[in-house]
Image (tube, coloured by chain):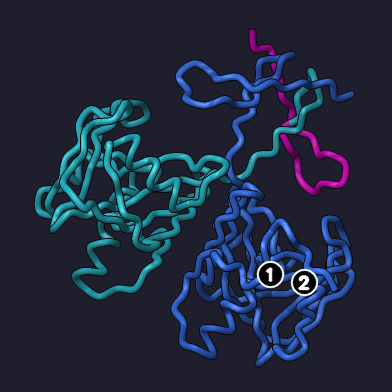
Chain colours: A cyan, B blue
Amino acid sequence: MPNWSFEQRIPPGDDRPRSVCTGCGFVDYQNPKIIVGTVVRFGDAVLLCRRAIEPRLGYWTIPAGYMELGETAEQGAKREAAEEACADVQIESLLAVYSIPSASQVQLIFRGTLAEPAFAAGAESLEVELVRWNNIPWQQLAFPSVVWALRHDRSIVEEGAAPPFSAPTSLWGHDLENWPPVG
Amino acid sequence: MPNWSFEQRIPPGDDRPRSVCTGCGFVDYQNPKIIVGTVVRFGDAVLLCRRAIEPRLGYWTIPAGYMELGETAEQGAKREAAEEACADVQIESLLAVYSIPSASQVQLIFRGTLAEPAFAAGAESLEVELVRWNNIPWQQLAFPSVVWALRHDRSIVEEGAAPPFSAPTSLWGHDLENWPPVG
C-alpha cells in the first residue's frame, strides 16, 4: 500500500525547495509537463471529442494529452488523435505554444488533417464529431486552451495570421479562474 | 539516507509501465522535460557561455536550462540568461522546438537581444562572451542542439528561413550517438 510522505526541502547544490520523500529520500523533481494536441481539419470542419473522463467529463476538446517518453511532440500529437478519436492524422505544422503556469503545463498544439473522414470514439471519448465553425459548441468546450486553439487556427484561414501563437493575455474574455464560463 | 527502490509496473487505469517505488508505492510519472533557452544577439554577435558544470564542462553553449514551475517558457528562457550570463535579455520570438526523444527532452529555443553589452559569468559559467559567426568555436560547442540553434538563427538572417524549426533529421553531420565530434 502507498505510504509515501513528501516534504519541501532544498537538495544539496539546488537553489529552490523540491519534494523530498521523508521515508526514502527520493527527490521528486517537478517540472512543467507537456501537452501535445492537434486541431484536425477535414474540409471546413474540425475534429472534436467529447470527454469520457474527468476533468470536464462530457465536454468537448481537441485530441490532446500528455507527451510520453520516447516520442517527438509530433508523434505524441498523432498518438493522441489515434487514441482519442481513432483517427490517422497527418501532422502539418506547429500552431501554438501555450505556457499555462497555473496548470504547470506547456501545450504544443499542431495543425493537422484527415485524409479520409474516418474516426470513432476511443476509450477516453464518449463521441467524436467533425464540426463546422458555426456549429462549435463554445459553451461546452472543456478548457480555455481549446477555445484558443480553435480561434488561432481560424485566424490563419480568415486573417492570414502567422503561427505559432502564445496563450492570449486577454484570454478572449475567458480567464482560467472563472473557467468554465457560466450559462 | 535515501533508500528508495523503483520497479516498472503498470498502475491501475494506465496503459504502460511506470516507475513505482517498492517501498512506499509512489508512482514516479516520467514525462519529457522542457529545456528553455535563447540565441541572444547583440549586433552581429551571439552570447555564448562556457559551462562550469557537467555534462560537457568547459564547452560552449547558449543560455538554457530546465523550465521550472510557475513560469512561462519565455520567462524561463529569460531567467536562464540572467542566471548563466547575468544578462537582461529581451525575448523576441520562438526560434525552434527541438524534440529529442533520446534525451527525454523538448527544447524551446527563443531569439532574443541585449539592449546593452552587459553580461558576466554566472555560477554555472566559466566565462561568457559575445562571439561573431566566423569565430564560433564549432568544435567546442557543448551539444548538437547548440549547433542547430545557432545555424537556424543564422538561416533566418541569411536565407530568410521561417521559424520555428524542428530538430534536423540530417543533424548536419552530427548524430547524437557520435557526439561530441572528434578533433
* Residue denoted by label 1: B146
Give the quarter of the image for residue B20: top right
- Is mark 1 in CB contact (under 8 Å) with mark 2? yes
Looking at the rendered image, the quarter that the C terminus of chain B falls into is bottom right
Q: Position of residue A151 (x, y in %)?
A: 26, 59
- In terms of secondary structure, where does tag 1 sit? helix
Question: Which residue is drawn at the image coordinates 37% and 63% (left, top)?
Answer: A93
User: Magenta-highlighted stretch: main secondary structure?
Assistant: loop
- Foreground of the two, A110 or B17: B17
Question: Which residue is drawn at the image coordinates 44% and 53% (left, top)?
Answer: A74
Describe residue A13's horizontal placement relative to residue B170 as left or right. right
Describe residue A71's horizontal placement relative to residue A142 as left or right. right
Describe residue B34's horizontal placement relative to residue A51 as left or right. right
**In this picture, which residue range is highlighted in magenta?**
A1-19
Q: Amino acid at mark 2?
A: Leu
Q: Position of residue A183 (x, y in %)?
A: 18, 38
The verdict on residue A95 being magenta is no
* Residue denoted by label 2: B141
Question: Which residue is drawn at the image coordinates 52% and 46% (left, top)?
Answer: A71
